[in-house]
Image (cartoon, rainbow, N blue to C red):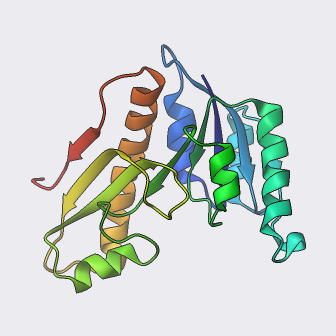
């Protein structure tokens, strides 16, 4: 299977995905695409031999349709079987999502359906939750609303801050996303569940 990965920044989740697709893994990365030419993940992808492309969203202004058409052109040329959003910081329109429906995965830093959108770690703390985590889901037109394919959870500590919690959840993301990608690639049973809350 051919996997395209969309990023906006340092690409830590992208790196874990690319590095997992070796040996007997049934998938390989075919493209890393970013909306930011300065994204640190682009060089990391090139160092791993993965083709890269950039579509800067800024020249398009409020014309999201034309921006997404440019994204789709690069994706079509790469012919991916799956698209993994990995820290891609642009909200995608229903038109784009429909075009790539059933092929697009996203990782979100909360135990969905809790805390869709931003500031998930602070919201979990403010709500007095005892556990938090991350989810991988199919992308649908509604933000962070698609069917969940896997979750990883961690206990919230009494002295946690949003920053300390985010750091622990990120480590879980690096375990969960490759596990879900492999399961999807192999048509293995889903969801993938990782429970680090007892550690």
Q: Is residue 70 above or below residue 91?
A: above
Locate residue 31, reporting x and y percent: 72, 37
Between residue 20 and residue 81, name the one nearer to us: 81
Residue 167, by quadrant, is bottom left
Residue 125 lies left or right of residue 79; in this view the side is left
Residue shown at 36% from the left, 68% from the top: 166
- Identify which residue is drawn at 53% across, 22% down: 22
Quadrant (top left/top right/bottom left/bottom right) for the N terminus: top right
94 in relation to 180, above or below? below
Q: Position of residue 77 (x, y in %)?
A: 83, 33
Residue 163, picture quadrant: bottom left
Q: Name, please, the residue furthest toward the top.
A: 24
Residue at the bottom extreme, as displayed: 126
The mark total stands at 0
Residue 172 placed where, x, y %? 33, 51
The residue furthest left is: 198
Q: Residue at x 84, y 44 (%)?
A: 73
Query: In the rendered view, would you say 22 is above or below 112?
Result: above
Q: Is residue 87 left or right of residue 170?
A: right
Residue at image point 34% right, 74% down: 121
| Nearer-the-camera pick, 171 or 75 | 75
Q: Give percent across and percent down for residue 19.
A: 53, 33
Question: Looking at the image, can residue 37 be seen?
Answer: no
- Let me know if residue 80 appears in the view: yes
> Along the horizontal axis of the image, is 165 left or right of 71?
left
**Residue nearer the viewer, 155 or 89:** 89
């Amino acid at each position: 299977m051919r996997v395209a990965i969309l990023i906006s920044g340092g690409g830590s989740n992208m790196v874990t995905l690319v590095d997992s697709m070796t040996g007997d893994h049934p998938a390989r990365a075919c493209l890393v695409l970013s909306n930011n030419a300065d994204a640190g993940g682009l060089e990391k992808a090139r160092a791993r031999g993965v083709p890269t492309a950039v579509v800067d969203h800024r020249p398009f202004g409020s014309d999201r349709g034309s921006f997404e058409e440019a994204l789709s052109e690069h994706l079509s040329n790469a012919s991916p079987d799956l698209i993994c959003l990995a820290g891609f910081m642009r909200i995608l329109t229903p038109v784009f999502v429909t075009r790539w429906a059933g092929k697009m995965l996203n990782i979100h830093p909360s135990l969905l359906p809790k805390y869709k959108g931003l500031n998930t770690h602070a919201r979990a703390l403010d709500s007095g939750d005892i556990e938090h985590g991350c989810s991988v889901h199919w992308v649908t037109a509604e933000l962070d609303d698609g069917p969940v394919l896997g979750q990883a959870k961690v206990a919230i500590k009494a002295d946690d801050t949003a920053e300390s919690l985010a750091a622990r959840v990120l480590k879980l993301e690096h375990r969960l996303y490759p596990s879900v990608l492999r399961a999807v690639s192999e048509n293995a049973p889903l969801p993938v569940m990782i429970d680090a809350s007892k550690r």
